[in-house]
Image (cartoon, helix red, strand yellow):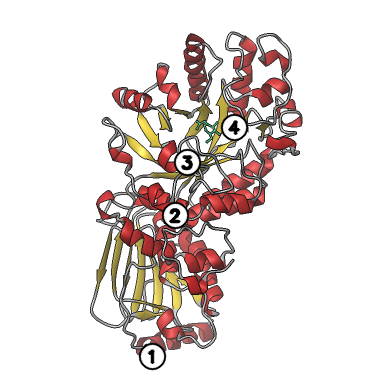
Amino acid sequence: MKYSILALLLFTLWSCTEPLPEINKTLDTSTLVPLPVEVVEDEGYAFSINPSTKITYEEAALSTQAEALAAHIQEVAGYDLMTAEGAPCRNCISLVLDSLLISDSPEAYQISSNQEYLQLTANSSAGMYYAVRTLQQLLPVAIVEGQPKDTLMAIGAGRISDYPRYGYRGSMLDVARHFFSVADVKRYIDYLAAYKMNVLHLHLSDDQGWRIEIKSWPKLTEIGGSTEVGGGEGGFYTQEEYKDIVQYAADRHIMVIPEIDMPGHTNSALASYPELNCDGKATELYTGTQVGFSTLCTDKEVVYQFVDDVFRELAELTPGPYLHIGGDESHVTAKPDYIKFVTRVQEIVASHGKQLVGWDEVVTAELNEDAIAQYWASPDNANTAADKDLKVIISPAKYAYLDMKYDTTTELGLTWAGTIEVDEGYQWDPAELEDKLNDDNILGVEAPLWGETIETLDDIEFLLFPRIIGYAEIGWTPAGQRDWSDYRERLAAQQAWLDQQGINYYRSPKVPWDANKMQN
Ligand code: TNX
């Protein structure tokens, strides 16, 4: 014991006097996406991470994040930094929880640096997670032999103060049209987390497949999960696997919102259980890509029993407040039936302690005041949502659908809402879309990836990247600070990370990629 106290004392004395590198480097935003709210440069030398830098944290709750940061630095620079609970100190990267004055957002953080100290301060562990993400973007993705490590591992003197515009920044993955493995979904989560997104909406059922185990209705997955678009074998997540996804997401400050689409988009359920159909006959499994032809029989009591069982089991798997009921494109459900159905389902959702989210069509029903509409196509529905004082998630197909082709030559994707080049996906603003939508009623932004044309992780990546990075910035950065000509440079700077991650991204001609470094 004595020995270790002595060691600590010596370490402290030595670290107070040890000369630190004198590095001139500016704190700039050229590698940062989303762009932070404020970056102020200071005079003086940069903080340079070196082999004797320590990582300290003031609360035990931050130890995981400190370890993760140490692991990242090990990967990039090969330094084995010591991590320890303790106060900020010289030549230390210090993680501090403190209430920040810049914003009351639980996701706010600050980074301040000078030659001797690098401090990450946040309102909460979510904020600290984003501080670490920003720090990672300030560092190179890797250091190659012969490069000046001191400079590359340096953070210019100054201060970054940052918090998101919206508390809801998400993406939807459709695992119903084509099934994707747990490993693929985790990778998707990693991609969202890298750019400070915090919601993963999973589209778990559609005409072509049912993807989540429901113990009280086992044929949903046995039959309904057995195929997909094109006739492949489909698949589903057991409840254990689903919990694993939810936990993996939570560890990255991402909430999972499960969607069971109804009353339309239900053929996989209608093929599994004849009693859900008005004529009592099971439908055939469907592997095409038409929409709007199926409906649950809204007059039957057993349908509401079914909905209750499904949402009860899903609610138990869902720590977050939301259950998404779909509600889109129910073209063969008579209007009064649709309204009656949504109204009843909303009570079922509420009875399991959750808030309803639905595609914008749901606003045609009487909704509780805590219901949330996801605007994808109809301006009328969006304005109605505003009139009813509902919160709205912004997912306009013509700007934010990740399954739209980049241009007419893109092999993957659809074009029904147009094509979306990288600049078009970036240059729009959620609060400028419709008269009645503004930041008071907008909950946030979500970019959906529908799965009709995609079968592999490579396919996912191609439609996702680089557009998803722009949606992350739209959800985070104040509108007045966003500018395409600046963004395209910062986007190009993501190339090193995209290549290092082995991501199959679209080499958009609109982005000034470094041709010398271009792979493929
Ligand atoms: C419309 S967006 C749909 C989906 C399709 C998508 C394809 C929405 C609520 N419904 O069923 O997969 O277009 O882009």
Q: CA distance from mark 3 to mark 4?
A: 26 Å
| Point 66% across, 23% down: residue | 267
Residue at the extreme front of the image, as rendered: 409
Q: Secondary structure at mark 2?
A: helix
The residue that disc 2 covers is: 469
Ligand 1 neighbours mark 3 (CB distance < 8 Å)? yes
Regarding residue 224, the answer to whether it shows in the image is: yes
Mark linked to residue 401: 3
**In terms of sequence position, does the residue under pointer 2 or pointer 3 come before the other?**
3
**In terms of sequence position, does the residue under pointer 2 or pointer 1 come before the other?**
1
Q: Nearer the viewer, mark 3 or mark 4?
A: 3
| Point 61% across, 46% down: residue | 245
| Point 74% across, 26% down: residue | 219
Residue type, label 2: Ile
**In terms of sequence position, does the residue under pointer 3 or pointer 4 come before the other?**
4
Mark linked to residue 314: 4
Q: Are marks 3 and 1 in contact (CB under 8 Å)?
A: no
Q: CA distance from mark 3 to mark 1?
A: 54 Å
Q: x, y percentage for residue 100?
A: 28, 57
**For the C terminus, which image quadrant?**
bottom right
Regarding residue 66, the answer to whether it shows in the image is: no
Q: CA distance from mark 2 to mark 4?
A: 30 Å
Q: Nearer the viewer, mark 2 or mark 3?
A: 3
**In terms of sequence position, does the residue under pointer 2 or pointer 4 come before the other?**
4
